[in-house]
Image (cartoon, rainbow, N blue to C red):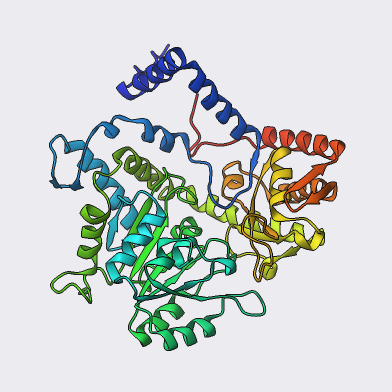
Amino acid sequence: MTEPSPKSNLARFAEAAVHQLEQVDPELSAILDNEYRRQAKVLTMVASSSIADPSSLICEAMTPMNVTAEGYPGRRFHAGCRHIDEIEQLAIDRTKAIFGAQFANVQPMTASSANEVVMFSTLKPGDTLLGMDLDSGGHLTHGSKASISGQVFNAVGYGLDSNERLDYDQAHALAREHKPKLIICGTTAYAREIDWARFRAIADEVGAYVLADITHVAGLVAAGIHSSPIDHAHFTTTCTHKQLFGGRGGLIMIGKDHDQPAHDEPGKTLAQVIQNRVFPYFQGAPNQSSIAAKARGMGFVGSDGFKAVARRIVDLSQALAAAFVDKGYRVITGGTDNHIVVVDVMQKGITGVNAEKALEDCGIVVNKNRIPFDQKPPSVTSGIRLGTNGLAIREMEPEDMVECVEVIHDVLSHLEQSGEKEYRVDAGAAARAEAEVARLCALRPIRTYPPVQG
């Protein structure tokens, strides 16, 4: 009989830590356990996150957290960073290899902070940036007045045409009129592929930099399913927890322009400016446990099996959009090229916030979202946004999307509104939905990649 392998130091550490938490803080331990059970038993159909692999999650709880490591590999301001340097360099090398980048900074705490680093590397207060309107599918950090991007800088917004597609002609005209120093492309609630080369041509004409925020399509870019902006944009940013299945954090990458001289900083390249803006300008010591999780996420994205996951993400989203259309819902842009599906529920007389809450009550997690030319405020909205990253990790099939939409439609068809934020759902419909969600979750449990033996 083969003797079992001895447990590693990491395995013993993790087991002891969980046991200690259960003993010394049962209240917190119980809450964490309940959250674990909740995620296993609900259909997470939000576009804003995914389901990180346990091998990425455990990195977040490891001993690199104990090390202060201001600086970069080989150039730290603190001792004790030998293995910390190895972790960060591994994350950098994997990121560059996967995306074909010449430069990568893996220290940003979030994608929002990564975007802010780029802005403050290319703009001065009062300078003009051109980004996608929030209501058209852009992100807060692309120039919204609610964000620092729209308060420190003169933010001009482009939007959609009459077909709800990105209006490149409008973006071109606005760039000619306002002469921005930075053009931001990439979205948070737009379901179609983006023409990075066209944005670069617009930017070159007016002398602007291009920032491509690929947060919602990073996995599809890595898998070659969505075109890459790396050598079209001057800077490419993303988070690492939506489609890269790593820990929460951000990345900044540069392609062929990495050694281009910076406009306003003589003697420095774009890569050098970014390095100096991340640390020490914006951040101090990085979260090395998070960087370890990023490295693990990149290990997954670079594996042979990831392309199948990325392909499944798109297959599921397109099946989801088609199922909504078949049920008579208006899907924004009529479909999707990525993992995002935005649905107009106001057409059915339901606000986005009521749809979100009612579905959550029944075990389906989506988020309220404004639709183009929305008349409702952000706290109410006329639409919902769904995503298929988490469903792909469950290895769901396109036919499962038909069942998901059947459940959603049943709930929304039995929802009675008493106000923009007040509702009730028929008890029978809620019970049917909860039972079907439980069945689907049992049929398609959350997977690990690659599958763990034993």
Task: Provide residue 334's location: percent of width, then percent of height.
Answer: 70, 68
Q: Nearer the viewer, residue 175 or 223?
A: 175
Q: In screen coordinates, is 25 left or right of 287?
A: right
Q: Nearer the viewer, residue 203 or 100?
A: 203
Instruction: Please indicate, yes or no, whether residue 405 appears anywhere in the rendered image.
Output: yes
Which residue: 35% across, 41% down?
290
Instruction: Please indicate, yes or no, whether residue 254 appears anywhere in the rendered image.
Output: no
Q: In screen coordinates, is 122 left or right of 373?
A: left
Which residue: 31% across, 60% down?
117
Q: In screen coordinates, is 433 left or right of 387?
A: right
Which residue: 37% across, 41% down?
293
- Relative to 130, say whether 320 is above or below: above
Task: Provide residue 393's location: percent of width, then percent of height.
Answer: 56, 43
Quarter of the image for the N terminus: give it.
top left
- In the rendered image, which quarter is residue 77 located in? top left
- In the rendered image, which quarter is residue 25 located in? top left
Question: Could you tell me how many numbered marks the image carries?
Answer: 0
Q: In screen coordinates, is 13 left or right of 132?
A: left
Task: Provide residue 151's location: percent of width, then percent of height.
Answer: 41, 66
- Relative to 278, say whether 375 is above or below: below
Task: Provide residue 277's location: percent of width, then percent of height.
Answer: 24, 59
